[in-house]
Image (spheres, grey):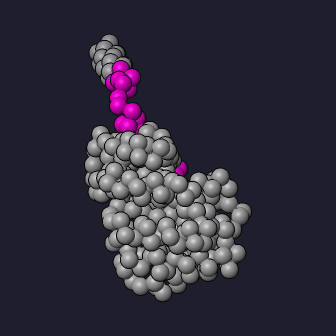
């Protein structure tokens, strides 16, 4: 009876050892790089989060514009910036830059910063890694060729992203940028609304979102007062690259946070 129990015990022990060996072999299998990331942990640690603002002691903000459509508003916005001797960052879509090379050249010639707004204007979080890569790379190739610069900042269309979008952009040399203050100019709310909203919600290190597309006709009228209000409040207004050099990227989303919690 004792021998029988010992035999059963040894058989069970042998089965456990075989199973453990099999698991160990599977754990050493080579998997795709993306599968090796623990995206849940990454998100908690802000590893795969985009930049929403900049942690800085300076009372400074970045003025940014997205352009995907039209040729009238870009010129009007550039006229206002030139009149006020103000530099900004322009996130350009690939197809638009390819069609309006003269405007891209004006943006560069007048000292503004070029950044990428991707290729097709679609929600990248719904795409595969290869489709995301193609979108970003296609726009990059056009922007480098047309502007003569090599952008390093990327804003996904519609501000739509997930961990894979941020990771893929980073692999292509881009830092993904969202925003902390949306002017809502794309909703065509009128110049006074845009001025009031931006003046109210701007905080130290904020990244301001405007559009210089024909879909945002109120922007040129609102912009002079926006600039005046922010400067009278003590803010330095600059390009994204200049703001990033003043501190560290902040990857916690401040949008919707109580005003009392924002770094004024």
Q: Is residue 40 magenta?
A: yes
Residue 18: image location, x then y, percent: 32, 18
28 or 77: nearer the eye? Answer: 77
Query: Compared with residue 42, is residue 8 higher up or lower down, i.e. above or below?
Result: above
> Looking at the image, which residue sits at the far bottom?
192
Q: Is residue 96 magenta?
A: no
At horizontal 32% and vertical 54% (from top left) the residue drawn is: 99
Query: Compared with residue 61, is residue 95 higher up or lower down, i.e. above or below?
Result: above
Can residue 11 be spotted in the picture?
yes
Residue 235: image location, x then y, percent: 67, 72
Magenta extent: 25-46
Residue 128: image location, x then y, percent: 28, 44
At horizontal 37% and vertical 70% (from top left) the residue drawn is: 72
173 or 102: nearer the eye? Answer: 102
Quadrant where the N terminus sits is top left
Residue 238: image location, x then y, percent: 61, 63
**Total residue callouts:** 0
85 lies left or right of 66: right
At horizontal 42% and vertical 62% (from top left) the residue drawn is: 66
Quadrant where the C terminus sits is bottom right
At horizontal 44% and vertical 38% (from top left) the residue drawn is: 171
68 or 152: nearer the eye? Answer: 68
Which image quarter: residue 31? top left
Can residue 211 be spotted in the picture?
no
């Amino acid at each position: 009876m004792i021998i029988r129990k010992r035999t059963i015990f040894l058989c069970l022990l042998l089965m456990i050892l075989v199973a453990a060996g099999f698991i160990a072999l599977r754990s050493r299998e080579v998997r795709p790089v993306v599968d090796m990331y623990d995206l849940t942990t990454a998100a908690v640690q802000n590893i795969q989060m985009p930049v929403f603002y900049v942690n800085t002691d300076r009372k400074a903000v970045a003025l940014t514009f997205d352009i995907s459509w039209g040729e009238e508003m870009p010129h009007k916005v550039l006229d206002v910036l030139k009149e006020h001797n103000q530099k900004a960052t322009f996130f350009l879509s690939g197809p638009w830059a390819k069609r309006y090379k003269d405007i891209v050249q004006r943006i560069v010639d007048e000292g503004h910063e070029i950044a990428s707004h991707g290729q097709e204007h679609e929600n990248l979080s719904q795409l595969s890694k290869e489709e995301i890569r193609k979108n970003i790379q296609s726009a990059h190739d056009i922007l480098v060729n047309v502007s003569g610069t090599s952008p390093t900042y990327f804003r996904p269309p519609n501000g739509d992203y997930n961990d894979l979008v941020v990771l893929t952009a980073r692999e292509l040399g881009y830092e993904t940028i969202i925003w902390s203050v949306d002017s809502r100019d794309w909703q065509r709310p009128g110049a006074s609304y845009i001025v009031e909203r931006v003046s109210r919600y701007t905080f130290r290190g904020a990244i301001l979102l405007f559009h210089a597309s024909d879909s945002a006709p109120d922007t040129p009228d609102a912009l002079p007062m926006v600039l005046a209000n922010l400067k009278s409040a003590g803010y330095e207004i600059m390009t994204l690259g200049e703001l990033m050099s003043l501190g560290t990227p902040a990857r916690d989303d401040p949008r919707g946070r109580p005003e009392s919690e924002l770094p004024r």
